[in-house]
Amino acid sequence: MTLREHTIQAAVGSTIMAPFLGVDTLILFVSMILIDIDHYFDYVFVCRRFDIKGMFKFHDFVCKNRESVYGFSLFHTVEVFSLFFILGFWSYYFWIILSGFLVHFIFDIYDLYVGNALFSRAFSIIEYVIFRKKGVRGYPALPYGFWEKV
């Protein structure tokens, strides 16, 4: 999904929850968008680049080549969700963040399902490590001249 789609999703979800959360709705809104910061980490790790524009270009390429991708997005894993759930007993703000992450994740799962790429992303850190050790490819190789294209 695009940044625009996730922002709309966060705005609608936050509007629905505003009567129940009050000002804390801002935390829900931000968490529904910032969960995707892990895509930037993927980009930096895979491409060894740091520019935001390049990150969007890289992930557009990845989305168009989903059939050859086995990606990893740290904040989209069951371990991170579990951590936020446990931290929620310390401060309920973590449960609000977890709620935002889960709503975002549900839309991501639906998008992956519709795109016939449900298993193109690891849903667990352990899963990713095991499959990578078995030789499952990660991100596709970028074509020659990828960064020179406008």
Image: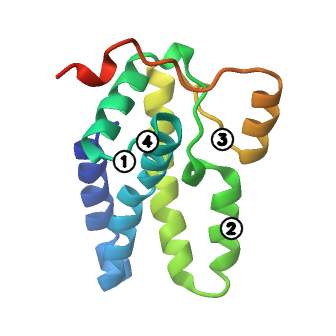
Seen in the image, is 15 located left or right of residue 112?
A: left
Q: Which residue corresponds to mark 1? A: 50
Mark 1 in CB contact with mark 2 (< 8 angstroms): no
Q: Which residue corresponds to mark 3? A: 123
Above or below: residue 21 compared with residue 55: below
As measured in the structure, the alpha-carbon distance from the residue carrying label 3 to the one carrying label 2 is 14 Å
Label 4: which secondary element? helix
Which disc, if any, is residue 107? Answer: 4
Mark 1 or mark 4, earlier in chain: 1
Above or below: residue 53 compared with residue 60: below
Label 2: which secondary element? helix
Mark 2 or mark 4, earlier in chain: 2
Name the quadrant of the N terminus: top left
Give the residue type that dot 4 points to: Phe
Label 3: which secondary element? loop
Mark 1 or mark 2, earlier in chain: 1
Q: How many neighbours does mark 4 have within 10 angstroms: few (below 14), some (14-19), or many (20 or more)?
A: some
x and y, in percent, of residue 71 in the image: 58, 32
Give the residue type that dot 1 points to: Phe
Q: How many neighbours does mark 1 have within 10 angstroms: few (below 14), some (14-19), or many (20 or more)?
A: few
Mark 3 or mark 2, earlier in chain: 2
The number of numbered discs placed on residues in the rendered structure image is 4
Mark 3 in CB contact with mark 2 (< 8 angstroms): no
144 and 101: which is toward the camera: 144
The residue positioned 79% from the left and 44% from the top of the image is 126
Q: Which residue corresponds to mark 2? A: 83
Using the rendered view, name the quadrant where residue 137 is placed: top right
